Amino acid sequence: MKGIVNWAALQSLAMRGFNGGALHKQMQDNPGEFWGKTAVMYDKMAKLEEEYTRNQLETLILDPSDSVLDIGCGPGRLAVPIAQKTDRVTALDVAPQMLAVCEQNAREAGVNNLETRLLTWDDAIIGENIEKHDVIIASRSVAMADLIKLNSAAHKYVFVLSFAQSPSLKQACDSLFIGASDTVTPIPPQNRMLGYNVTFNLLYDMGIDPSLRVVKDGFTCNYSSPLEAYDDLRGLHEFPAENENIFRQNVDKYLKPNPEGTHTFRIETKTYIIWWQPQQLKL
Ligand SMILES: C[S@@+](CC[C@H](N)C(=O)[O-])C[C@H]1O[C@@H](n2cnc3c(N)ncnc32)[C@H](O)[C@@H]1O
């Protein structure tokens, strides 16, 4: 079906809109290298996100007998807990470092039904080098750029997830190092005009009736003292030691003292989840 708005053009604008397109270009030119370098930071942030990630997991429709393909799985933020609820998970990613962290997280969680797969999604051919799975997950993933391919990869459901507003994971991490590190260039806040409405409308024009849910997301941890928080968060990004006070002031913005003397670090945001049952498309 042809819609009255060219959502595909808006989608490509949305995908290269931030950072004047420079970050997008790095990601596209060599995604394995780009994402590999972020694996440790991403894993740390994903661990701070664990409590909020449950809101996303609760929305997924999963059966214990399901096979699940997580495209661009990263450190397994979703893939590992999904493996605990389903028959088996294929965790696909282009970055070997991300897959190594994913395997480590699976081992630590006692998960043995998760198989990692080093492959760029662009080279994945459904039914040839990657089988159809019951459920497809594309979370903060380049795979969201091709909804037709996602539709063709699932027997039962496709779920796409990403940040519904700023901050994203990277923006949340960067906010702790602005002014402390000159390699942190703040990414402008997300433009609501080019948000999940674009994905929703693309699917609508494909003849799909997608479901949509927006859930609370965020990054949190309880620390015994601000010092413990600084020590834990400092490793997320390198910066010169003389800028320690700037880093601490940034962290302090997100630390709240509790009556019993501990301190809670919290940055909140929102995530959207769009899902549908795969079908014959009316294109
Ligand atoms: C923002 S992270 C998302 C991680 C995870 N899905 C989550 O929601 O936490 C994006 C992931 O996609 C992977 N990736 C990027 N381009 C890819 C491609 N062309 N094929 C497969 N994976 C890719 C990156 O290596 C990275 O692990």
Image (tube, grey):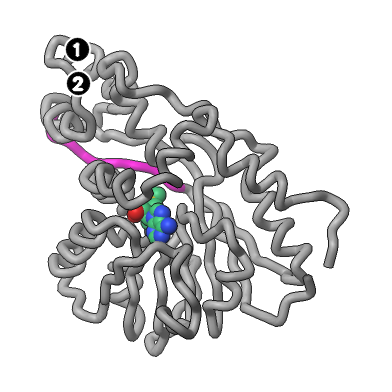
Q: Which of labels 1 and 2 is toward the front?
A: 2
Q: Which mark is residue 239?
A: 2
State the residue lying farthest toward the bottom: 65
- SS under mark 2: loop
Q: Quote the CA–CA distance across marks 1 and 2.
A: 7 Å
Q: Residue 243 carries which label?
A: 1
Q: Name the foreground residue: 166 vs 257.
A: 166
User: Where is residue 137 drawn, in percent x and y?
Assistant: 46, 67
User: Looking at this view, is 19 or 197 the one in front?
Assistant: 19
Q: In which quarter of the image is residue 151?
A: bottom right
The magenta segment: 217-225
Residue under the image location 55 percent in, 72 percent down: 158
- Name the residue: 41% across, 33% down: 171
| In magenta segment, residue 220 | yes
Residue 211 against residue 282 in the figure, above or below: above
* In the rendered image, the vertical position of residue 277 relative to residue 72, given as above or below: below
Kind of residue at disc 1: Asn
Residue 245 percent location from the top left of the image: 19, 12
